[in-house]
Structure formats: structure tokens, C-alpha cells
Image (spheres, rainbow, N blue to C red):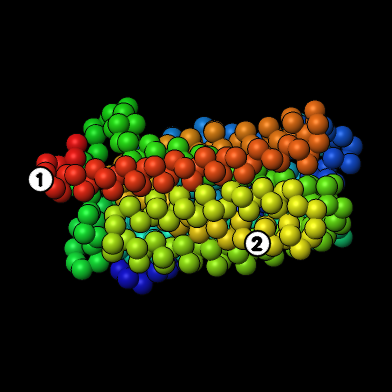
């Protein structure tokens, strides 16, 4: 079973990497698409990057329910195959509407995968390892994003923007077949561990899953730690998603860089800071978990608060040495939250409702986060300039950090009071 869990981690991480290649192959192509026969406005152009997120967000609750009840490997395989085909179809688009529809269709496949994979991972490994395991899984975000930037930029430079979609989409079909052989362990089988790694202020175990889907969502909405975690995650995603989608255009238009230099340099920064930040954040979160059960929230909140001024400096400084340094520091701090905050989400709910909890968090963080972020930047850019429009992003990062620090402090205080009085926190 240990070998099957490790194989599952490798396969799911590879899928997650391709997931982000397919997402971030688009931003480096935007300036070429703007010059194409479609001639989109900035509002249309930047809405293209969030087209799949709209469908992804709306589809996530459905797949969350299915993932808590059906075969998780089969659902994941279907999702990966669907998003891969949809990505490749974007290369055949002959109108902006067709291109938008192809990108939107990617969201159905990614919803099947994105909602179910974290619950499967949580059942592969014990609670005390999840920060590290999720840091491995989510390190695919910077790696896949960087590969998407580089692939899109280099293919576009040499062969045009259409072949970039073919190169990004087709490899996923192989992993879809591999997914069919993954082990589907019993739900909650790894949640009964105990030992010296448990934090001294461990929370009361989560209640069992309610009988109906409506009751499950109602229970999640009554779970204040979960609600606050997801609310902070939405603000964080607004900032990170906005940066990821508009930075290639920002570097070309505002900083005057070439497409190849902008995409390759930003991609290289994303992969190096992402690897370092995600791994260090995951391991540090698990280490601090020995001292407080709110370690994941504390780490994420403090790191994101520190990232906010760095984001502002990256977008406003005129000297390359200043803005590139700020980009590196900001990306590192933002990625440090990736593993811990997703671990916090799955630990705050019972095993039988994890896929639904992940699905609801996906719905919220995207509908309030990276779905509106690039479009809003585009609207402001059309009315003023791209340089002015991006200044809303560090504000969102600051808000996310504040919410997470508040949530960590609130829960730590309630646990201490509960321990002192001997009364369980309701």
C-alpha cells in the first residue's frame, strides 16, 4: 500500500503539472492573439485567461459530490482526457468566440481533477505528513506554470500561437490512461493516527459527513475555521492569479521587454521560487504543527502579509534590479502558502466530505479570485493603463494575509480557552 501511495503521489503530481501547463500556456500568447485577426480589447483579452475558470468554478461542486461517492481514479482520468482535448482544440479556433469556448471547455476537465485529487492524496498519507505531501503535489504549480510560460513563449516565437495549444494539450492523454490504474483507498483510513507528532492543542475531530449534499454544504458553511480559510484563500488567489495572467503582458508593454525575455525570465523565476517556496513552506508548516494546530494558517498569513509590499514594489519600481528582486521575493513568499493552506482545508473537515469541501473552496476562490482578477485588470487598463490597473493586486494579497492571521489567532485563542475550562469548543 505504501508503494501504491507513492505511485499515486507521482502520477497526481505529474497531472497537476500538466494542469498548470495548460492554464499558463495562454498568458505568453496574449500579445500575439491581440495582434491576430481577432483584434480583442484588453477586457476581452484578459478574460480569455479566466474563461476556463468560470466553467471550472461552476462544475467543481458537481464533481465534489461525485468524488465523495464514486471511483476517484476513473473520474480523474476522464477529467484529464477532457481538458487535454479541449486545450488542443483551441489551436483550431477561427474566431475569438470559438477560442473562448475552447478555453472554457478546459474547465470541465480540470474541475473533475482539481476537486478529487486532494481528497485522494489525503487518504494515501497520514495527517502528520500532509504538509510535506501537499507541498510535493503543489510544487507542480510553479513548475507547470513556468513550463507553460516558456512553452507558450518559445513556440509562439518560432511557429505562432496556435501550435502552442497542440503542444500543451496532447501529452495529457497519456496520463489519463495511467490514472485508470491508481489505487482508490478507503476514505478516512489515514485519519486515526496518533503519536508524538500530534500538536498539543489538536482540535476536536471533525463530525461525520451529513446524509445529504445540501446538509453537507450547510455543515461546511457553519464551519467557521473552514469559511475563514477559504475567504483568505480567495483574496490570495485574486492576487496570485492576477499576477500570473497579466505579468507577461505587463513586462512587454510597461517594461519594454521582448516576448521571449519576458516569458522565459518570469517563467524561470516562477519555477525556482515556486520550488523553494512550496517545499520550504510545506516542511516548515509540518514542523510548526508540533507546536500549534494552527501552524498552517499562521505560516500562510504571515508569508502573504510580507509578500504584499513586495508585489507593490515589483509593479511600481522602475529599476530592473529593484523590480526583479521584488518579483523573486514576492513569488517565494506567495508560494510558501500553497501546501500549508490546502492542508489546512482538508484537515478542517471530516474525511467523508473532503472532496465536497475542496470543491466548495475551488468555487469560492475562483469566483472571487482569479476569475474576476484578470478581467478587472483589463477593464481598468482599457480606461487608464496596464501599469495603473495592476496596483489592485497587492491590496488583495494584504487582505488575504489579514484574514488568515485573524483565523489562526481566533482558533488558537478558542483552543486555549477550551483547554482551560474543560469545555469543548462548539
Question: Which image quadrant is residue 185 in?
Answer: bottom left
| Quadrant position of the N terminus in the picture | bottom left
| Residue 300 locus on image (x, y percent) | 45, 53
Residue 392 in percent (x, y) is at 65, 38
- Tell me the element at label 1: loop
The spot of residue 388 in percent (x, y) is: 76, 38
Q: Give whichever of discs 1 and 2 has the lower sequence position.
A: 2
Looking at the image, which residue is at 32% across and 36% down? 224
Query: Quick one: SS at disc 2?
Result: helix
In the rendering, which numbered label is found on residue 422? 1
- The answer to whether residue 130 is left or right of residue 418 is right
Tag 2: Cα neighbours inside 10 Å, few (<14), some, or many (≥20)? some
**Quadrant assignment, res 132:** bottom left
Residue that protrudes farthest toward the bottom in the picture: 3
Q: Residues within 10 Å of mark 1 (few under 14, many from 20)?
A: few
Q: Nearer the viewer, residue 185 or 235?
A: 235
**Residue at (60, 64) in percent of width and height:** 273
Residue 294 disc label: none
Residue drawn 80% across and 53% down? 318
Q: Which residue is mark 2?
A: 328
Quadrant in which the C terminus is drawn? top left
Q: Is residue 129 left or right of residue 191?
A: right
Residue 385 seen: yes
- Residue 88 in view: no
How many marks the image carries: the answer is: 2
**Residue 229 locus on image (x, y percent):** 40, 42
Amino acid at each position: 500500500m505504501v508503494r501504491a501511495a507513492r505511485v499515486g503521489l507521482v502520477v497526481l503530481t505529474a497531472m497537476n503539472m500538466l494542469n498548470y501547463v495548460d492554464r499558463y500556456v495562454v498568458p505568453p500568447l496574449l500579445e500575439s492573439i491581440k495582434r491576430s485577426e481577432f483584434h480583442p480589447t484588453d477586457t476581452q483579452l484578459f478574460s480569455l485567461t479566466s474563461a476556463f475558470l468560470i466553467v471550472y468554478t461552476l462544475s467543481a461542486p458537481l464533481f465534489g459530490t461525485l468524488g465523495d461517492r464514486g471511483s476517484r481514479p476513473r473520474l480523474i482520468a476522464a477529467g484529464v482526457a477532457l481538458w487535454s482535448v479541449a486545450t488542443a482544440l483551441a489551436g483550431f479556433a477561427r474566431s475569438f468566440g470559438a477560442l473562448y469556448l475552447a478555453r472554457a471547455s478546459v474547465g470541465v476537465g480540470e474541475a473533475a481533477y482539481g476537486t478529487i485529487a486532494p481528497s485522494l492524496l489525503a487518504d494515501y498519507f497520514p495527517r502528520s505528513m500532509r504538509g510535506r505531501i501537499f507541498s510535493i503535489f503543489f510544487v507542480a504549480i510553479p513548475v507547470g506554470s513556468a513550463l507553460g510560460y516558456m512553452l507558450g513563449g518559445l513556440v509562439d516565437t518560432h511557429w505562432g500561437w496556435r501550435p502552442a495549444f497542440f503542444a500543451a494539450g496532447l501529452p495529457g492523454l497519456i496520463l489519463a490512461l495511467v490514472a485508470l490504474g491508481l489505487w482508490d483507498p478507503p476514505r478516512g483510513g489515514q485519519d486515526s493516527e496518533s503519536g508524538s507528532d500530534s500538536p498539543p492543542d489538536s482540535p476536536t475531530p471533525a463530525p461525520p459527513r451529513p446524509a445529504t449534499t445540501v446538509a453537507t454544504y450547510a455543515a461546511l458553511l457553519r464551519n467557521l475555521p473552514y469559511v475563514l480559510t477559504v475567504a483568505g484563500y480567495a483574496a490570495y488567489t485574486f492576487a496570485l492569479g492576477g499576477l500570473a495572467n497579466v505579468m507577461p503582458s505587463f513586462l512587454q508593454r510597461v517594461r519594454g521587454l521582448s516576448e521571449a525575455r519576458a516569458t522565459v525570465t518570469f517563467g524561470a523565476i516562477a519555477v525556482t521560487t515556486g520550488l523553494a517556496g512550496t517545499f520550504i513552506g510545506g516542511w516548515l508548516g509540518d514542523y510548526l504543527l508540533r507546536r500549534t494546530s494552527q501552524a498552517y494558517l499562521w505560516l500562510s498569513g504571515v508569508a502573504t502579509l510580507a509578500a504584499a509590499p513586495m508585489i507593490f514594489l515589483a509593479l511600481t519600481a522602475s529599476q530592473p534590479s529593484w523590480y526583479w528582486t521584488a518579483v523573486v521575493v514576492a513569488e517565494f513568499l506567495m508560494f510558501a502558502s500553497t501546501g500549508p493552506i490546502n492542508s489546512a482545508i482538508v484537515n478542517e473537515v471530516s474525511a467523508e466530505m473532503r472532496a465536497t469541501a475542496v470543491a466548495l473552496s475551488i468555487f469560492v476562490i475562483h469566483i472571487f479570485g482569479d476569475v474576476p482578477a484578470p478581467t478587472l485588470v483589463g477593464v481598468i487598463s482599457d480606461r487608464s493603463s496596464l501599469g495603473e490597473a495592476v496596483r489592485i493586486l497587492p491590496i488583495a494579497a494584504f487582505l488575504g494575509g489579514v484574514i488568515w492571521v485573524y483565523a489562526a489567532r481566533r482558533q488558537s485563542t478558542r483552543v486555549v480557552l477550551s483547554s482551560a475550562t474543560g469545555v469543548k469548543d462548539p
